[in-house]
Image (spheres, rainbow, N blue to C red):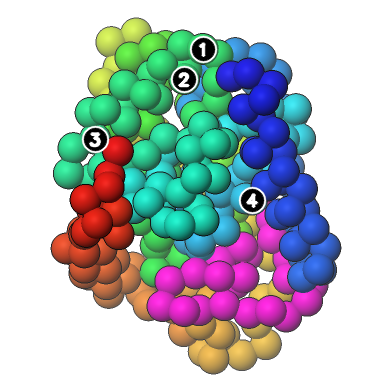
Amino acid sequence: MSSVSERPYRAVIAVCRLLYRLLGLRVRVTGTEWIPATGPAVIAANHNGFADFTFVGLVGTERGRLIRFMAKESVFHAPVAGPLMRAMGHIAVNRAAGASAAVAAAHALQRGELVGVYPEATISRSFLLKDLREFRPGAAALATQLGVPLVPVAHWGGHRVLTVAGRRTLRRGTAVHIAVGEPLLPVPGESPEALTARLHERLEGLLSALVEAYPQRPADPARAWWWPGPLGGAAPFPELAARLDAEGVARADARPARGARRGTLT
């Protein structure tokens, strides 16, 4: 993309860094050497909060690169976020008809871009990685189709800032840890489903390690809404979270986009 089109993205990055400082976030990023310095790659990350793209985006900016994220179409019709998302070159995804988004993502990869994908598609209310059956194969399909690396990125702690159901905290000093894993290279003849299974295993390992080593474990896990249920926290267990996630998606899909109600979708 042209240098002019990069300006809004870099301006947003500057604003995010300012917000990090105001909130006193303790952000740590490891494994950025696994992000290709040049050329295309699919960046696949877990999804547990509304600010995820700002944290996952750090793994690109620390390598001097920008990630074009695939995001749900409704975000692109929001009054403020929509114009910014388009200006930054992100890719709108219509869950009911994702073919055009896949084509746009493929074109970005062919230009040598980094494309960011959330295989879970929606925020996990358990804050843990969703079951493999809930993983979408789009990231792996792009990687196998174009023969590009699939780079796993796990993060933990950012969901404490802002996530679903109005959960958030403005407490200063929240730790946010992000880990990049070794890229997965598609094997000749490998199906997207097989590569997705490998991706899930790699992400699960990365995320488990982040949670285990997290420096701000709650003193009383049972009262901590952001701590995983299987570890004694108040977050819903994965089975209940899966039902809540599905209900949330159904409600979101049932609401027409604001622009659609005005008849101004483009």
Front residue of 140 and 208 = 140
Which three-letter amino acid code belongs to the residue tagged 4?
Phe
**Number of residues whose C-alpha sits closer than 10 Å to that of mark 3, classed few (under 14), some (14–19) or many (20 or more):** few
- Which numbered marker is on residue 95? none
Q: Position of residue 234 (x, y in %)?
A: 46, 84
Left/right placement of residue 75 relative to residue 155 reads left
- Dot 1 or dot 4, earlier in sequence: 4
Q: Which residue is mark 1?
A: 111
Q: Secondary structure at mark 4?
A: helix
Give the Cα distance between marks 1 and 2: 5 Å
Give the Cα distance between marks 1 and 4: 24 Å
Left/right placement of residue 43 relative to residue 57 reads left
Tell me if I can see residue 69 in this picture: no
Q: Quadrant of the C terminus?
A: top left
Q: Position of residue 20 (x, y in %)?
A: 76, 61
Give the Cα distance between marks 3 and 2: 16 Å
